[in-house]
Image (cartoon, rainbow, N blue to C red):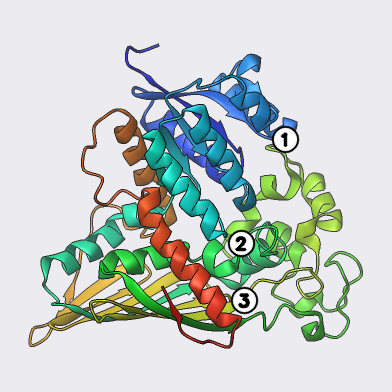
Amino acid sequence: MIRNMKTISVIGLGNRGTEYMGFIKAFHSKKAKIVALCDISQQALDDVAPKFSIPKDKQFISTESFFAKGVISDALIISTQDASHYEITKQALLTGYKYILLEKPVSGNKAEYIELRDLAKEKGALLIICHVLRYSNYYGKIKEIISSGQIGDIVSINHTENVGYFHFAHSFVRGNWHDEFASTPSILAKCCHDLDLIAWFVDSPCKTVSSVGELIHFRKENAPQGAADRCMGGCKARKNCPYDAERLYITDPFYKAKFVKYMQRTLTGKAKNSKADVVDAIRNGDYGRCVYYCDNNVCDHQLVTMTFENGAKAVLNMNGFSDKMFRECHIVGTKGELIGYGTKLKMRIFGSRPKNISFGPVSLGGHVEGDIRLVSGFIKLICDEITDLKDITTIDATVISHDIALAAEESRKNGGIPITL
């Protein structure tokens, strides 16, 4: 092993955990190495461990057995399901891990994420939360322009998260985030990224939050005539249904296919799948259920209005019914405005001609670039190459977005009344 090579353990071998492992292996193999894995699925361990040459004695089927070994690496990545984040992270801090990268959200319980913040401080640990959008060139450029004063003081922000009808159905109706009690509310699970961006841009404490929203569409009373409990269970409404699971996950051609078609591991739990495996998963698993007959309870649309101490106002619109996945952002200042649409950014300084803004060689503008740069930043952090934590998404920074999200839920459930933070 290379001298001074940093070691990393990973708890949770789902899509995000294995993606980050791949980035480390592809881009940072001279600085860091994955040395231990933990997951509750033996299939996941069997699939992933050989790709990273992880020996059997460094593969753990439970967090209890993992933490029983003490601190076995320089850093830890926790990429499990939302409801498990608090307990696993608390144990990691108590065990003595000093560098932890935790998938968002931290918790849907304020007492829990405040406890983790305070515990990290007490233990001298850096607990980094995966608010990946901050790390992209696109949103970094927006922050840079705001901080430069070019558009003056922020007056208002209008930000929309277009989730995508197929993504919402996959994750928040059929998938792991369909139940707020087993996971977290959709405004926290999906939009703590967006709330984090807004708070980061405004850079002033949030004073009040109000919100309206509901689960309006994915309900049994909205099922089309002839719909069955499962898409491949005799449904007579499939032909004209955009949520038909067989089409979304199997038959759509490449030029029409949504990203969910390529999430076969999510459907089957296995890394390698035949068409028969995927068909069986659709016939019998969660992702083949009719979206109108699921046991989902999270909002499919929600508006959050925020006021900040410096006078700025912001509105976040979470929309589960867009044709594509993209974000829109209109930031109005006293001297000009920024208009962001997907990966395009335009600046208008009042009295001047509009200007298209370039924000670097990579124009993905979202998760992929942000994920890559987040992992890069984490590697630099554990290698002592970063000393200024100003724009690093530590637990201290993420508390703000979580506070706003929980206040939004309190407001929504009480008729939209303003909640003071």
Three-letter amino acid code of the residue under disc 1: Ser
Calculate the distance from the C-alpha at mark 1 to the C-alpha at mark 2.
Answer: 22 Å
Which mark is first along the chain, 1 or 3? 1
Does residue 18 appear left or right of residue 29 in this picture? right
Can residue 126 be spotted in the picture?
no
User: Quick one: label 2, few (<14), some, or many (20+) residues within 10 Å?
Assistant: many
Q: Which residue is mark 2?
A: 184
> Is there any visible trace of residue 94 in the rendered image?
yes
Q: Position of residue 365 (x, y in %)?
A: 36, 60
- The residue furthest left is 351
> Given the image, on which type of amino acid does mark 2 rest?
Thr
Q: Residue at x 30, y 53 (%)?
A: 362
Relative to 106, 389 lies left or right:
left
**The quadrant where residue 273 appears:** top right
Q: Position of residue 241 (x, y in %)?
A: 74, 77
In the image, residue 356 lies at what x, y percent?
Answer: 20, 72
Per the image, label 3 sits on a secondary structure element best described as loop
Q: Quadrant of residue 401?
A: bottom left
Q: Secondary structure at mark 1?
A: loop
Choose the circle earlier in sequence order: 1 or 2.
1
Q: Which mark is residue 300?
A: 3
C-alpha gap between disc 3 and disc 1 = 30 Å
Question: Which is closer to the viewer, label 3 or label 2?
Answer: 2
Tally of numbered discs: 3
Q: Identify which residue is drawn at 75% across, 69% down.
A: 244
Q: Nearer the viewer, residue 247 or 287?
A: 287
Residue under label 1, please give it. Answer: 41
Please tell me whether mark 2 sits on a helix, a strand or a loop. Answer: loop
Labels 3 and 2: the sequence-earlier one: 2
Amino acid type, callout 3: Asp
Answer above or below: position of 22 versus 36.
below
